Amino acid sequence: MCRANGAPEPAGTGDEAGTDAAFTALLEDSAEDLYESAPCGYLSTMMDGTIAKINATLLDWLGLERDAVVGRKRFADLLTIGGKLYHETHFAPLLRMQGELRGIALDLRRQGGDRLPVLVSAVVKYGTGGEPLLIRVTVFDASDRRSYETELLHRRKEAERAHAEADEARQQAETDRARLADALAVLQRSLVPDSLPAVPGLETAAHYHTAAPDQLGGDFYDLFPVAGDRWAFFLGDVCGKGPEAASLTSLTRYTLRAAAHHDPEPAAALATLNAVLHERYTADGDPRYCTCVFGIVEPGGDHGPTIVRLASGGHPPALVLRSDGRADFLPTPGGLLVGVLPDAPIGTAETVLAPGDTIVLYTDGLTEARTGPGRDDLYGEDALRAFGADLAPAAPGEVITALTGLLDSFGDGLDDDTALLALGVPADSSLIRPAIRPATSFPA
C-alpha cells in the first residue's frame, strides 16, 4: 500500500509490534502457570476424595496452605456441614454413576469460618481399561451470583408481600365500601317515608332513585294528613350531597310537617321553611337552600271535585296528565329558592283533578339527565311533557312505573338523585286502591 503522496507504507507500526509481543508472551506462558493462576479454582482428588492437587487460586480463596491440604484433606472437608451432607447423599453418588456433574451450587468453608458460595463441575478420569483413576474438579466463585439471587429473592418476597398487602387493603376497602353503602342506604331510606299512607278517594305512588351508593342524596318527599279531610304533600331537592345535605333534608322535612299542622296553606308552609333555613344557615355565613313544591289536596270523592293547591320555591313545575289524553305543566312562576332571602317570593297555583287525572311531582334529576350519543344534551321539560302525553290517561302507579323505566334507560346519563311522587283520582271511584309503596332504587 502507498500513502497519498506515493510514498510506500511502512511494513509495521508500533501497535502491531505491541500485539506481536503480547501474543509471544502468551505462547511462552507455561501450562503450570495457567493452572495455578487461573481465574477459577482447580483441584484433583483420588476416587475416595483425597485431594492430590489444588491450584493457588483456590487456596487463596480459602486461606489455606498447600501442605495442609494436599494428601491431608478430602474434597468434602472443604465444604460446610450442609455441603458435606449434600456431597455424601447426592454429589458423590451421582458422580460415580454419571461420570460428570456440572454447575452444582455448594458452599466452601474458608479458614476464618466464612462461607464461599461456589459452582462446582466435576469429571471422572478413566484409565485405558475403563477403571476410574481420579476426579478433576473446577470451582467458580459464585459470591456475586449468590448475592444477586439473594437480592432477587428478597425483592420477590417484598413484591409478594406488597401484593398481598395491597390485595388485603383492596378487600378491606371493598368491605368498608359495602358497609358504608349499606349504612348510607339505611340512612337514605330514613329521609323518605317507608310507605305512603292510603288516602281516601286518591291513588298515590312514589319512587326514589339514588345516583351514588356512597353518597347521601338530597331529594325528599312526603305525604301526610292535616286538619279535616285535607292531605299535605311536598317534594324537593336540597343543595349539596353527603351528611350536610342529609342534615338539611331532615330539617326541611320536619319543618314542613310542623308548619303544615300549624298553617296548612302551601305558601305559609314554604314561608316558614324559608325563615328557618335563612336563620339557621344564611345568617351564620353558611347559606343552604332547597327547591321545594308543597301542596294541599282535598279529595272530593262522591261529593265534589278534588282540589289541589300548590306553592313552589324555585322547583320545576308539576306535570298533570288529564283523562282526555292531555299532559300539561302546572306553572308556579316567580318562586325563588327557599332559604336564600329573608322574604323569598313563592309561586302558587291551583288545579282540579277530575276522575282519571294524575298530578306528578319530580326533582330535576329527571329533566337534567344527559342524553344523546355524547351525553351532551339534557332530557328537558319538553321531552317530559311529550312522554306524559303518550302516557295519558294513566293512574299514578302506571305513571311511576313508566318513569322508573325512563330513568333506567338513561344509564350513566342519570348522575343525580331523582324523586317522583304521583297523586291521582281514579277514573272509577269503586276501583280506588291503597297507596302504592314507594320504590327506592340504589345503583349496584
Image: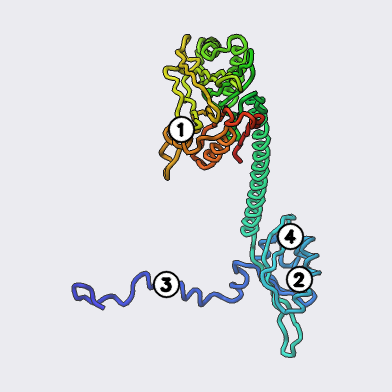
Between residue 145 and residue 301, name the one nearer to us: 301
Distance from the alpha carbon under mark 4 to that under mark 1: 100 Å
- Give neighbour class at mark 2: few <14, some 14-19, many 20+ (Cα, 10 Å): some
Nearer-N-terminus badge (4/1): 4
Q: Residue furthest left?
A: 5
Nearer-N-terminus badge (3/4): 3
Q: Nearer the viewer, mark 4 or mark 1?
A: 1
**x, y percentage for residue 186?**
67, 30
Distance from the alpha carbon under mark 2 to that under mark 1: 97 Å
Nearer-N-terminus badge (1/3): 3
Determine which residue is flagged by label 1.
326
Circle on res. 220: none
Determine which residue is flagged by label 4.
109
**x, y percentage for residue 193?**
65, 26
Asked if the residue under mark 1 is in contact with the one under mark 2, i.e. CB atoms within 8 Å, the reply is no
**x, y percentage for residue 357?**
53, 29
- Residue depicted at 63% across the width and 49% down the height: 159
Q: The disc labelled 2 sits on which kind of residue? A: Phe
Q: The disc labelled 3 sits on which kind of residue? A: Thr
- Give neighbour class at mark 1: few <14, some 14-19, many 20+ (Cα, 10 Å): some
Q: Is residue 182 above or below residue 257?
A: below
Q: Quadrant of the N terminus?
A: bottom left
- Give neighbour class at mark 3: few <14, some 14-19, many 20+ (Cα, 10 Å): few
Determine which residue is flagged by label 2.
91
Asked if the residue under mark 3 is in contact with the one under mark 1, i.e. CB atoms within 8 Å, the reply is no
Nearer-N-terminus badge (2/1): 2
Circle on res. 19: 3
Give residue 145's quadrant in the image.
bottom right
Instruction: Say what secondary structure mark 2 lies in.
Output: helix
Between residue 326 and residue 167, name the one nearer to us: 326
